Amino acid sequence: MTKSINTSGVGNAINRVEGHLKVMGKAKYASEFPVENKVYGQGINSTIAKGEIVSIDTSEAEKLEGVLKVITYKNAEKLKTLEGVRPEIATDSIAPVLQSNKVHYYGEYVGLVVAETFEQAQYAASLVKFEYKKDPTAVIDFEKSKSKAYTPDNGSNYSRGNMEQGFSEADMVVEQTYNTPIEHHHPMELHAVIASWDNGKVTAYSSQQIVEDAKIAISGTFQIPKKDVRVISAFVGGGFGSKLNLDQHVILAVMASKMVGRPVQVTVTRTQMFTNTNMRQQNEQKMRVGAKKDGTLTALSHETLSHTSTTQEYQEPCGMVSKMLYNVANNEVTYKLIPMNIQTPFAMRAPGEATGSFALESAMDEMAWKLKMDPLEFRIKNDTQTDLHENRPFSSRLLVECLRIGAEKFGWKDRKSEPRTNKKGNWLIGYGVSSASRNSPYLKTHSKVILELDEDKVFATIQMDATDIGTGSYTIIAQTASEYLKIPVEQVNVELGDSDFPITPGSGGSWGAASFCNGARAACENAIKTLKNNRNIAEDKEVAVSELLKKNQLTKFEAEGIAEPSAEFGKYSVFSFGANFSEVWVDKDTGMYRIKRMVNVASAGKILNPKTAYGQIIGGLTMGVGMVMAEQTRVEPNFGNFITRSFADYHVPVNLDLANIEVIFLPEEDKIANKMGIKGIGELGITSVAASISNAIFNATGKRMRSLPITPEKLIEAGLEEGVTA
Amino acid sequence: MRPFTYTSAKNKEQALQAFTATSHYLGGGTNLMDLMKENVERPDQLIDVTNLDYKKITSNENGGLTLGGMLSNSETANNKEVRTNYPLLSMAMLSAATAQIRNMASNGGNLLQRTRCPYFFEVSMPCNKREPGSGCGALNGMNALHAIFGYSDSCIATNPSDMCVALAAIGATVEVQKPDGTSRMIEFTDLHRLPGDQPEKDTTLMPGELITAIHLPKPEFSDHYYYLKIRERSSYAFALLSVAAGLQVESGVINKVGLAMGGVAHIPWKLTKAEEFLVGKKPNQSNFEAAAALEMKDAKPFEANKWKVDMGKNAIVRALTQAYERKV
């Protein structure tokens, strides 16, 4: 029966297999599961940055119709608490909440109201009165608190070669500081959970990127066996890192369910998305770059000053790019953190690369300008095929090809090297380029395939606890099964996001596609191999899976598979690479600018589905445009709250802000990366977009913008009428 | 959200009769509902006035148009007569918010939209406008987006409307129904008030008064007009600063100017000095620059919003230039 059916296999631009469910509203997100008898919890947030709760008056709230419980630290379940001084936050960290009267940041949960309806819970939450004793030592002003910075004890500081010698060999030195603000993930789907506590067993429909880690976090926080926790995250409306770990609202819901004896839904409001679901922290990155006149890099130093919370430690690896992207013998990367009374930051799309590349690729552009070199050629001159940080070769690296092909498509040769020479009316026009790189991890993944024979057709179900955070996991896993079972994708059913399914690393860090698909591949291969072995059929003999089932006299067969990195994998550095080109028109009177064109070239291994991959890159570029144009969360310097508290204040790009975007995937199959040749793509797109646009703004205006976002007021402050101030 | 009662008024009499001290008229709800969800506005009763018969655009005795108070911003801005005769107003209105919000928002409501000051929106922070006597958080806080003209120690917030900036440039009269059933007329420039020591009062409307119509003067700026809105993204953003400019030019000389600025004061800021200066002058760069300088020298920016002075100068010159060059 199996003709060549690979129109739906790996590499084909098929439509999303779950697309119809989504447009019909049938794809169930966490808060949409029809759990009977459920009630609603509404979190209450602190209104001071540091201090103690002195008194709580719940009487008015408790009097309201429908209110079942007001939970505060006074009556909360006892939970496992964090140990040690600022333990490092991880994707499976426990998330204790309401365990004392101490307040650590503005917006921290101080209570939860449980009521029959959402409206009742919300209104009651506004009536609970807290009296605080404010601690005046709250650390809320980054600029004024730099003396409190410490070096994290996590081994991230790094150096190679001899920095002093490197800078002494340099003919030119660029030394500049680049600032990026607090940013928030803001997936469209609000974080939400429906949790039930049933005789010590927990079921949580929760919007999570990694269900296994959510399960570990719940069991760890309540100190109950892992087997008694089930987490279901069938569809996730975006995560960007904010749903990597388990946030406290899930613990609140589980606790509330235990206390009221009914399932409890907690949905984080958009304003609470700022304070209770992580963020990217503010970074001050000091770059020092040395180069010879001919453009050879001699030294590169990358110092990052950031902040973490007072309760947990997170350090974004901003210097990662500086360690591996270019051929520079002398390199130093350091980190310092200020413990602040702001919530704990955590990974946001391309942690390290998104922000680090803004600093590095801006500094590279500054050096090229100083050397009077074409910034494209300067980058190519300093290419390396060896990862000097790990001291091992890249499994594949097509950065130069990305830059060359991008330059050709973009028309880079038309760029005027002197700023402010390309003008049209009120517009100053500039071109910018930047290199992009992103680590491409591949992690151990379990998967199960269930084959069912219906007359001559085989229907396959793939199960794993992987998640689809909007990226297309369902589709590419179905395509993989189609490829390896040689059946049409219509006969493949993919079931994800249930912690009862085989364990995967979940979605995050650009490891999802490679891990999930190889996991599905392993299960399918295992199924076929077993069916062949059972009937003594040579493994290399092509037999349709339907025939194999018949020969085995089976109508149903299950097999599991495990995919994991090979020994070879560890001998190489595995990264995706890319190049960004942009053309920006800056209005010299108003400081408003338009990004007219963007060209992105990506070398990201085997492209499983050009449609979903394109969506990933476009999404990344859009988020990169957001970083440049508008995204920033501002901390009020006297009170410590975020004054950007809704989408009216926290601006993300609108369609009109986006340019004509051309995305080019270079053909690449990196068999060292993994058997299917897949590399990560989810974070490559955002990487270095900000630098590409900022470099174009310099080329247009002659003004070097070193602080994101680059807003009209900052350009006006820079003085768009004057000459070049590099 | 606090519980409240909802009353749908079928006519003006019902609306006026239902009004109590803790009531709020409900137009499109695009601002009021947000503020209620934030616990900033806490009415006990909403009186829906969107069914009232003030949804027409008619000709008035001054040779201008009268815009119904309950007509939506979309229907107003896209009306053929408005587009032809008051393109400046149309342009300003269409630069505001999003198509969805403009479909909901009413003309009367637009005139009454409240500030976007973050201290006003967050009930745990001090704000004299929200809670008189609690102090102004922005004064010594984050004020990069705040006023540079006409503010007081009690309040440095700005008016967020685009429509109002155009109306300040064009000139208008606002018709208001009083609770006693009679009506009164308010000059548009008298509708909004500077904060002084009563920033809780955005306008000169008395409790229970309802805006039913906006009377526009004879069209004067249908040839030379421009609404310049400066913002960090291309739509769905309040103006960092905006300028509405209308010119009437005869024989190479300006004989009428309408000029106002948004995002700089508690009210749509009419640029009277610049207007007066330009009348009788030639519409050229140096006169536009002189007019801009004349206005902006009165600005009293804070450290964080000094950029508004430079941006303001550029914006006045640019808006006037664009307005003039539209038809030469």
Image (cartoon, coloured by chain):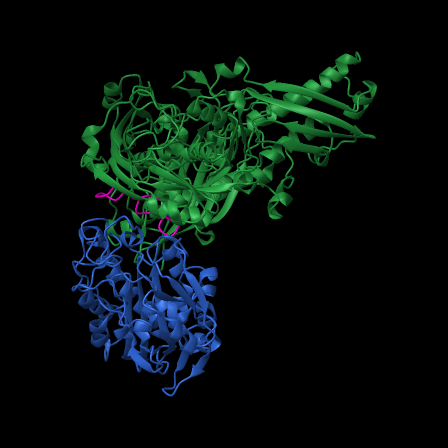
Chain colours: A green, B blue
In this picture, residue A575 sits left or right of residue B217: right
Measured along the vertical axis of the image, is residue A560 above or below residue B181? above
Count of number-bearing discs: 0
Q: A14 or A182: which is nearer to us?
A: A182
Residue A630, visible in the rendered structure: no
Q: A184 or B288: which is nearer to us?
A: A184
Q: Which portion, as a residue range, is magenta? A: A632-652
Q: Which residue is depicted at the point 55% across and 42% down?
A: A32
Measured along the vertical axis of the image, is residue B130 above or below residue A598? below
State the residue lying farthest toward the bottom: B61
Q: Is A145 one of the magenta-colored residues?
A: no
Quadrant in which residue B315 is drawn: bottom left
In this picture, residue B17 sits left or right of residue A677: left
Q: Main secondary structure of the magenta part?
A: loop
What quarter of the picture does the C terminus of chain A occupy?
top left
Q: Position of residue B22 (x, y in %)?
A: 33, 64
In this picture, residue A183 sits left or right of residue A486: left
Q: Position of residue A722 (x, y in %)?
A: 24, 52
Residue B133, visible in the rendered structure: yes
Q: Position of residue B113 (x, y in %)?
A: 34, 64
What quarter of the picture does the N terminus of chain A occupy?
top right
Quadrant in which residue A149 is drawn: top left
Q: A346 or A287: which is nearer to us?
A: A346
Q: Is A636 one of the magenta-colored residues?
A: yes
Q: Position of residue B217 (x, y in %)?
A: 35, 81
In this picture, residue B106 sits left or right of residue B314: right
Q: A638 or A686: which is nearer to us?
A: A638
